[in-house]
Image (cartoon, coloured by chain):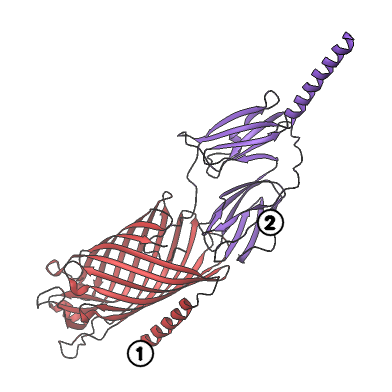
Amino acid sequence: MRFRFLFCAVFTATTLVLSHSGNACAEWLQDVDAGIFYDSNLSRAPTPPDERADTALDVSAALGRLFAPTSNDLLAVTAFARADWYQRYTGLDVVALGVRAHWRHKFAVGYDAPWLAVALDGSRDDYRDTLRDSRRLELKAELGRRFTPVLDGAFGVALDRRYDNNGTPVVPDIPGDVFNLRGVSGDVRLGYAITDAWLLGARAAVRRGDVESTAQPSLPIFLASSAIAEDHVFGGDDLYAYRLRGTTWTAALSASLALDDRTSLNFSFAGERTNAAYGLQYSSRVAGLLLAYRP
Amino acid sequence: MTCIRSFAVRALAVGLALASSCARAEGTTIAATVTDMKGKPVADAVVVAIPADGASKPAAKSREATIDQIDLEFVPRVLAISVGTPVTFPNHDRVRHHVYSFSPAKRFELPLYSGMPAQAVVFDQPGVVVLGCNIHDWMISYVYVSESPYYAKTGPDGRATINELPSRAYVVRVWHPELEGPEEGTRRNVDTSRSARADVAWQVDLRPEMKVRRAPAAGRGSRY
């Protein structure tokens, strides 16, 4: 209910902002990204037999308006759409529609002035597999600075919430809403432009909260779970989706090659490890290649 | 009669010589060529001729110069002006800009504006002034404020010509935003009193410009 209210409020505000095209002080924001990525453990399974890897095509587009209400403040309001198509596990194919509001305040004048940014994202994710249909909300605050024209860094904290009520309980007294998740995270990132064209990035993040894992039944995972549902996305009848409480560590590296002022080719690699109760652990590696275009 | 004719011929010769000397006195030229270490022409290099005796003709009342803002960039990237020149900063974008400089030669801000700012900015100290926009961090421009009225900027062919120079000895220097080392290191002595045209060439070492990247990077949110 809260999500619906927030989503409607942000969506209405976005529509109003986007339709207010007569404001000469506002700038159009248009982003188009397309690429592929590979995930070594889509199922986030704790044991290799249950791990499922796949490659997906990812396309996203965003349209928004950027306002500069003062010399030190920027407000961007954007509507976005994203679609993923998986090669093998097509139940994970998703179309997401959402809105994003992003405000940034610079504490002084100059490219090297420190800044504070707050972003609110809301989306509705429609999967081919209905178990995963959900609505997402993320609130993130970031403090950053460009130290030199070629080196910048930021530290952020985020609250994320995913609302789902699609899973059917399979165990009495244990709910089936495995994708009803919440978490809090922090991250630090650095960017360094080694040439005019190449920008390298590094990011480290930690998240504490609910995670989802699809695996065969076992005592530890059963004891650690707060929700269980049947999951047919990865084939077979012996896999179940579980909601666990865990801590996830992420380390990511990226390289962005500017093709011109508006286009870049982006390579990324991320390693992720989650530790949950009862010694449960799972890890995954995600690699991606993406073309980003900002007309 | 012969004496009168001889005098007339001499007077004519002296007159012509004087006229020629006067013409050269205000009409010599320095033709400069600037290339990088690979021999490629360097555009946007400022070539400045400073009278070796330090006495330069005071600059005529400087005409107004302009730095536009077009497609979220400053145009031109390098502007060469004399001390005391007023510069206007018309904004031809549909968004507002906030132009600033923290350079010692000229500190100023033109807070968030669109269209034409109310007043021109007068650059009253010699030196290099680096301009930025507080909204669009990648926007950068350089104003070279010259103490000498004799300067020119190279074009895409790396060539620049300083015309109408009084005939005398000069110290000529080159400045470029990417110049490795100080401007003083490019110093050359050129004497235009011996010839109406002096050709001077520089091969300069350039380092990549320290500039905020404009191109997007995936996963970093808005490019701002």
Question: Would you place residue B166 above or below residue A274 in this image?
Answer: above
Q: Which residue is mark 1?
A: A1
Check if mark 1 and mark 2 are on a common chain: no
Looking at this rendering, what residue extends furthest in the front direction?
A: B1
- Count neighbours of disc 2 (C-alpha within 10 A) and say few if under 14, some if 14 to 19, many if 20 or more: many
Which lettered chain is shown in purple?
B
Q: Nearer the viewer, residue B20 or A236?
A: B20
Q: Quadrant of the N terminus of chain B?
A: top right
Q: Give x and y (percent) for residue A248.
A: 29, 70
Looking at this rendering, what residue extends furthest in the left direction?
A: A237
**Subunit of mark 2?**
B
Q: Nearer the viewer, residue A237 or A81?
A: A81
Q: Which residue is mark 2?
A: B121
- Amino acid tagged 2: Val
- Amino acid tagged 1: Met
Question: Would you place residue A166 above or below residue A80 in this image?
Answer: below
Determine the image quadrant of residue B14. top right
Q: Which label belongs to residue A84?
A: none
Image check: B65 left or right of A46? Answer: right
Q: CA gap, disc 1 to disc 2?
A: 56 Å
Which lettered chain is shown in red?
A
Q: Give x and y (percent) for residue B8.
A: 85, 16
Could you say whether the residue bearing mark 2 is in a helix, strand or loop? strand
Q: Residue at x 86, y 12 (%)?
A: B5
Asked whether the viewer can see residue B204, the reply is: no
Image check: A17 left or right of B69? Answer: left
Asked whether the viewer can see residue B63, the reply is: yes
**Subunit of mark 1?**
A
